[in-house]
Amino acid sequence: GHVELISMDAVNWGYLSVEDARRGGFDSLADLEQALKRAGYRFRPLNDYQLYRIQFAWLEEAYA
C-alpha cells in the first residue's frame, strides 16, 4: 500500500510508551521488549540502544 511518513525520531527505550508498543502491533511494552531481544537487541540493556520511532499514515483512500 501507499503511506505517508508522518514522523521519525531517535529515542531510547525509556522514552517509549505502551501506545508506541500498541501502534507497532504489541499488547504491551514487555511484548515489544521480547520481540526486540529476539531481533538481536539482547547484548546490552535496551536503554543503551538508540531506537527509531517511525510513524506512517496509510493513504489507501487516496488511491481507491
Image: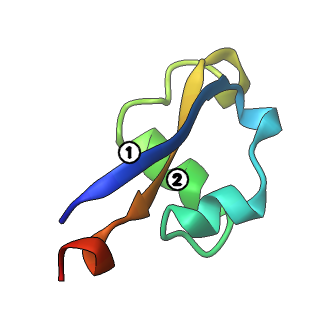
- The answer to which image quadrant residue 16 occupies is top right
* Local SS, label 2: helix
- Comparing 53 with 45, the one in front is 53
Please give the residue where the numbered disc 2 appears in the rendered image.
Answer: 34
Q: Is residue 41 left or right of residue 12?
A: left
Say above or below: 50 vs 15. Answer: above
Task: Work out which quarter of the rendered image holds the C terminus and state it.
Answer: bottom left
Amino acid on which disc 2 is placed? Gln
- Asked if disc 1 and disc 2 are in contact, CB closer than 8 Å, the reply is yes
- Rendered image quadrant of residue 21: bottom right
Q: Is residue 15 above or below residue 9?
A: below
Q: Which residue, given by chain and number where applicable, does mark 1 sit on?
A: 38
CA gap, disc 1 and disc 2? 6 Å
Amino acid type indicated by mark 1? Arg
Spot occupied by residue 44 in the image (x, y as percentages of width and height): 59, 18
The residue nearer to you, when weighing 46 against 14, is 14
Packing grade of label 2 (10 A; few <14, some 14-19, many >=20) is few
Classify residue 48 as left or right of residue 51. Answer: right
The residue at the point 60 percent across, 18 percent down is 50
| x then y, percent, for residue 7 | 57, 39
